[in-house]
Image (cartoon, helix red, strand yellow):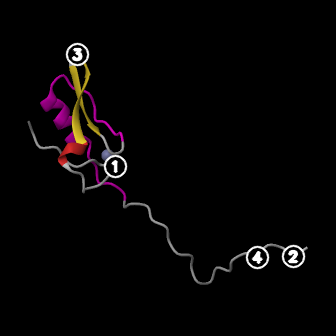
Amino acid sequence: MSELLPCPYCGDRMDDYVLQVWEVNVKEYAIGCRNCGASGPNDISKDGATKMWNLRREPKAPTQQWEPLPENVVTQEPAQP
Ligand SMILES: [Zn+2]
């Protein structure tokens, strides 16, 4: 079985056990991520599912982060009665 690429949603620090071959039904398999619940396309073989999962990986956007407010932004005070 080919090596699984890390989950495209969780990032790169996934351990092997996180990605799991799921038997979707009697004849189909998919790779699923136990961390975020993402799953790859179904395939009729485990190896195929692995390949599909690897194909699915795309360059992911940088993790969203909170950005500090620019210094010139004045915090709105509540209006005085
Ligand atoms: Zn994931």
Cβ–Cβ under 8 Å for marks 2 and 1: no
Which badge, 3 or 1, comes first in the chain's sequence? 1
Quarter-wise, where is residue 56 in the image? top left
Give the spatial CA distance, label 3 vs label 1.
Answer: 27 Å
Q: Residue furthest front?
A: 17
Residue 29 in the image: x percent, y percent? 22, 26
Q: Residue furthest top?
A: 26
As drawn, is 4 to the left or to the right of 25?
left
Kindly report the distance in space between the C-alpha atoms of the residues bearing marks 4 and 3. 61 Å
Give the Cα distance between marks 2 and 4.
8 Å
Q: Quadrant of the N terminus?
A: top left
Residue 26 numbered mark, or none: 3
Residue 9 is tagged as 1
Q: Amino acid at mark 3?
A: Val
Residue 77 vertical position relative to residue 39 in the rendered view, above or below: below
Question: Which label lies toward us, 2 or 1?
Answer: 2
At label 1, counting other C-alpha atoms closer than 10 Å, the crowd grade (few under 14, some 14-19, many 20 or more) is: some
Three-letter code for the amino acid on which mark 2 is drawn: Gln
**Mark 2 secondary-structure assignment:** loop
Mark 4 sits on what residue? 77
- Label 3 – label 2 distance at C-alpha: 67 Å
Q: Residue at x 18, y 46 (%)?
A: 16
The span shown in magenta is 37-61
Crowd class of label 3 (few under 14; some 14 to 19; many from 20; radius 10 Å): few
Near-viewer residue (36 or 49): 36
